Image: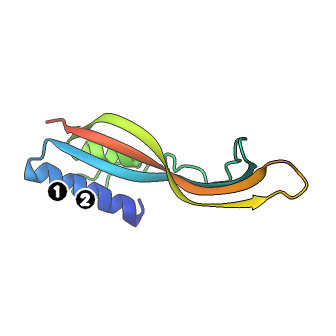
Amino acid sequence: MDTAESAIVAAASDAFERGDGWFEAEVEQRGTSGWSVYGSAASDVGRPAPTRREITPLGPGGASPRSDLLSRIEDEGWSLHTAQYVHVHLSEESRSSGLLSGDRVAVKGKIVGLYLFRRAR
């Protein structure tokens, strides 16, 4: 698990220990960018979304052998209630295509997963 994921799991654990009824996490899924002619779809040349990793053995203190982030959050006492994905627009650049009709637009952004967990126990 990388540092960002570890921080999210730690925050989930802290929220559970405080007695919070809900926990929300925002996780970047992938970056997007590409050129398109205005009005047509841009190509997605972003990196792929993180997927399940190789399962690790049970760690010290009874750490979960499950390696995907959402499962680790659930192991802290939460149950996934809602998952949504949004595109966060970071920048765009447009260029005239000269002799061709239409403008070319490069849009850069990222897809973010918004996860809402309800206290499970």
38 left or right of 46 in image = right
Residue found at x 41% / y 52%: 27
Q: Hey, which quadrant is residue 34 in on the image? A: bottom right
Name the one closer to the observer, 109 or 6.
Answer: 109
Residue found at x 12% / y 46%: 20
121 left or right of 3 in image = left
Q: Give the residue type at disc 2.
A: Ala
Q: Is residue 12 above or below residue 4?
A: above
> Where's the C terminus, which quadrant?
top left
Name the one closer to the observer, 20 or 54.
Answer: 20
Which element type, helix, strand or loop, lies under badge 1? helix
Q: Looking at this rendering, what residue extends furthest in the bottom direction?
A: 3
102 left or right of 32 in image = right
Name the one closer to the observer, 70 or 108.
Answer: 108
Q: Is residue 57 visible?
A: no
30 left or right of 6 in image = right
Q: Is residue 113 visible?
A: yes
Q: Which residue is mark 1?
A: 14
Few, some or many C-alpha atoms within 10 Å of disc 2 (few <14, some 14-19, many ≥20)? some
Q: Is residue 45 above or below residue 71?
A: below
Q: Give the residue type at disc 1.
A: Asp
Percent of width and height locating residue 58: 32, 51
CB under 8 Å between discs 2 and 1:
yes
Q: Looking at this rendering, what residue extends furthest in the right direction?
A: 99
Percent of width and height locating residue 99: 91, 55
Q: Which residue is mark 2?
A: 10
Percent of width and height locating residue 112: 45, 49
Residue found at x 41% / y 38%: 84
What's the image's color scheme? rainbow
Name the one closer to the observer, 42 or 38.
Answer: 38
Few, some or many C-alpha atoms within 10 Å of disc 1 (few <14, some 14-19, many ≥20)? few
Which element type, helix, strand or loop, lies under badge 2? helix
